[in-house]
Image (spheres, coloured by chain):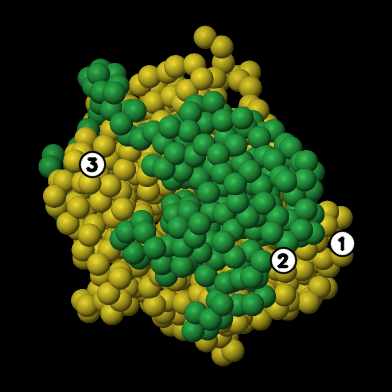
Chain colours: A green, B yellow
């Protein structure tokens, strides 16, 4: 996983509450077997007119937000399905950080697995950032995970909190599975005591089952 | 030991390792996978040279993109075909239980888990699917995970998790006639909002919940995620034990008796504390219909489409305006006057035998409205389908003008060819009414099976409480 330490970039606003993962990556793209290339599908139904022509009314298509890498969002961002295709698309599109007052749980988790920093700010702070983003073309922010701050070029400075463990993993780009496998002995000991393997008592139509 | 909740008891029993300031390592008893969210996990595993730790604890099924029309025909969709082949190959290579699309036990992952006894009380269950919350109805801790976590579970049979907060949702009193489990959960989501349960695991309590069948409890737990809660649970009781007994993967004989004794101790202790409590009176709940583009935009059948200007919060007002525009609804329209293009009875929320029985009772001897383009019944599993056919439900539906289909997710997510066309409006027993969920430009109203059935007959919504056939429906 790509580490996240400090990032400066253009801010793009999605001024909508409860943006769900069905919008981020519509279902027709859930049939792909890779993690790559989902950037094209991000907000597909909002972003494109028939024939995949960019919809000029959708905010990410405004020329001023071209190349944005920080996504400013509203409450309960990423609700709905568990599809990790959503953060894959966000990252592949070019976003490294999200700023919102709240997130849906699974989406929030999924961000950390993909090197995306989801920053939680207060509603007032988010409102202020929306104001500034809309007022100033080319509005940029610096998100610093080490310092836990957000700074703009006009004197704004917010600090944010984040779970220290998650922060550490993101700063170092740690591999979760590797971290767990270090504790192989604990897992084996737990299994020795507790493991109950399901036994099939009826002849079901199942493949590759070993009783 | 201080009094603990159901959630805390299951959590404590599954901690492999704890360290302050870090997430705990939790053991996973059952891992369910489907074609949609697993290929990348297996690819990641392979790339890292890792193996599946406990293939016997993983169960795979094909459900999201399967055809509900004819399984004998080759699939027209090359992407879906590739995904099915990937799942079959990954299961073959790793020795994982697979219910493929030809299996007579195939069905929606959240329907077959409980049905086959794979889901048991006290278990930890995960799946790369947010509606894994369904399995909590049996008194399990079950929640959806992303694909990276699927890979983590495959490799380690554990998950690294922070403990959630707890939330008690107490539905007091008796459920009025014509009001189903679906109406209760929609009423709850309407009350707490779709982010209301964020960060929490919900436990449903109270007389109205206790008196529900397992199917009804599954409907409620299924939609926990629509209220933002990652998991929903109901403490196991006699209803649960009776449901589990004799299921193919459930323990049998003495093992079952011993298991029941263990399961009985799972119920929340008197005096245990929840981080949040929400209380509803069942008597105040009416049949519910969503009018907007998320499940929290919901109202009783007797009411009207709300006026966005009646919302005091500007953000909510804007959301309601957008929703009504998308749904092509005018403020003040009576919900009963909304006419429909298609009706879908199915999905992991409401496609179990009891749901089909309730809907069949409503449509028996009647015929779907001429104005309707399609009325679809999609059983949640092939087991449900077979049982329903044995009772003649398929005939009742067919005679009434419904299409009777094979098991799968179908029009809930429209990943196969069951879709709404742009601008079409459906009454759907599924769980999500997001923009485009049932097809680009689709307009979805979430309702119970009896409401969907009655709406199919009339061509618009009706107050099912006036229909005697809706009596006794859960
Ligand atoms: S029926 Fe719908 S909600 Fe349930 S698993 Fe399938 S797609 Fe998901």
Q: Chain of mark 2?
A: B
Whether marks 1 and 3 lie on the same chain: yes
- Mark 1 or mark 2: name the one nearer the start of the chain: 2
Would you identify the image quadrant in which residue B240 lies? top left
Furthest-top residue in view? Answer: B1
Residue A151 rendering spot, x and y as whole percentages: 69, 40
- Mark 2 or mark 3: name the one nearer the start of the chain: 3
Residue A110 rendering spot, x and y as whole percentages: 47, 45
* Badge 2 vs badge 3, beta-carbon distance below 8 Å: no
Q: Residue at x 25, y 18 (%)?
A: A185
The residue wearing badge 3 is B48
Residue A178 rendering spot, x and y as whole percentages: 30, 31
Instruction: Answer few, some or many: residues within 10 Å of disc 3's Cα (few below 14, many 20 plus, some between 14 and 19).
Output: few
Q: Residue at x 28, y 47 (%)?
A: B44
The residue wearing badge 1 is B310
Instruction: Answer few, some or many: residues within 10 Å of disc 1's Cα (few below 14, many 20 plus, some between 14 and 19).
Output: few
Q: Is B167 situated above or below B409?
A: above
* Badge 1 vs badge 2, beta-carbon distance below 8 Å: no
Q: Secondary structure at mark 2?
A: loop
């Amino acid at each position: 996983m790509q580490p996240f330490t400090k990032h400066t970039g253009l801010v793009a606003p999605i001024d909508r509450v409860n943006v769900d993962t069905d919008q981020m990556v519509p279902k027709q793209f859930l049939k792909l077997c890779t993690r790559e290339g989902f950037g094209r599908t991000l907000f597909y139904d909002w972003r494109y007119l028939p024939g995949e022509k960019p919809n000029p009314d959708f905010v990410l298509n405004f020329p001023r937000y071209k190349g944005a890498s920080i996504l400013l969002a509203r409450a309960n961002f990423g609700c709905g399905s568990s599809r990790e295709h959503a953060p894959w698309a966000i990252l592949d599109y070019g976003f490294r950080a999200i700023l919102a007052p709240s997130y849906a749980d699974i989406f929030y988790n999924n961000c950390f697995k993909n090197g995306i920093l989801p920053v939680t700010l207060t509603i007032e702070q988010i409102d202020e950032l929306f104001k500034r983003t809309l007022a100033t073309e080319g509005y940029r922010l610096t998100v610093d995970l080490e310092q836990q701050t957000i700074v703009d070029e006009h004197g704004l400075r917010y600090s944010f909190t984040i779970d220290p463990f998650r922060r550490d993993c993101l700063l170092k780009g740690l591999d979760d599975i590797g971290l767990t496998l270090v504790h192989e002995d604990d897992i084996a000991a737990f299994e020795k005591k507790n493991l109950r393997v399901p036994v099939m008592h009826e002849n079901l139509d199942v493949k590759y089952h070993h009783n | 030991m201080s009094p603990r909740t159901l959630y805390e008891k299951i959590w404590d029993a599954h901690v492999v390792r704890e360290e302050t300031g870090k997430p705990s390592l939790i053991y996973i008893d059952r891992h369910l996978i489907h074609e949609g969210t697993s290929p990348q996990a297996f690819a990641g595993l392979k790339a890292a040279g890792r193996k599946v730790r406990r293939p016997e604890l993983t169960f795979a099924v094909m459900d999201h993109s399967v055809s509900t029309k004819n399984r004998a025909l080759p699939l027209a969709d090359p992407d879906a075909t590739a995904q099915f082949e990937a799942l079959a190959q990954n299961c073959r290579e790793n020795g994982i239980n697979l219910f493929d699309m030809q299996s007579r036990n195939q069905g929606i992952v959240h329907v077959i888990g409980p049905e086959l006894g794979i889901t048991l009380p006290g278990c930890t269950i995960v799946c790369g699917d947010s509606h894994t919350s369904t399995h909590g109805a049996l008194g399990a801790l079950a929640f959806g995970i992303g694909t990276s976590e699927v890979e983590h579970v495959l490799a380690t049979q554990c998950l690294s998790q922070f403990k959630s907060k707890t939330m008690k949702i107490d539905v007091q009193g008796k459920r009025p006639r014509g009001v189903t489990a679906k109406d209760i959960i929609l009423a709850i989501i309407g009350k707490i909002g779709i982010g209301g349960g964020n960060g929490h695991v919900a436990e449903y309590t109270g007389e109205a919940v206790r008196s529900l069948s397992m199917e009804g409890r599954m409907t409620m737990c299924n939609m926990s995620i629509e209220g933002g809660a990652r998991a929903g649970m109901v403490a196991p009781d006699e209803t649960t034990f009776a449901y589990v007994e004799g299921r193919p993967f459930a323990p049998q004989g003495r093992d079952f008796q011993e298991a029941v004794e263990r399961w009985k101790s799972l119920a929340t202790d008197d005096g245990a504390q929840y981080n949040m409590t929400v209380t509803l009176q069942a008597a105040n709940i009416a049949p519910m219909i969503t009018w907007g583009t998320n499940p929290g935009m919901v109202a009783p059948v007797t009411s009207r489409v709300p006026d966005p200007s009646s919302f005091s919060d500007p953000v909510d007002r804007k959301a309601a305006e957008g929703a009504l525009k998308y749904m092509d609804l005018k403020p003040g329209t009576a919900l009963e006057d909304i006419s429909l293009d298609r009706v879908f009875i199915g999905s992991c929320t409401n496609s179990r035998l009891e749901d089909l029985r309730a809907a069949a009772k409503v449509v028996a001897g009647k015929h779907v409205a001429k104005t309707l383009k399609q009325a679809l019944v999609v059983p949640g599993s092939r087991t449900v389908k077979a049982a329903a056919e044995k009772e003649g439900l398929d005939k009742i539906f067919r005679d009434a003008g419904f299409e009777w289909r094979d098991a799968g997710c179908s029009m809930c997510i429209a990943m196969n060819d069951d879709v709404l066309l742009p601008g079409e409006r459906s009454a759907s027993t599924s769980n999500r009414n997001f923009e485009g969920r049932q097809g680009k430009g689709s307009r979805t109203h979430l309702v119970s099976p009896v409401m969907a059935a009655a709406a199919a007959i009339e061509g618009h919504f009706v107050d099912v409480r006036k229909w005697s056939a809706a009596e006794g429906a859960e």
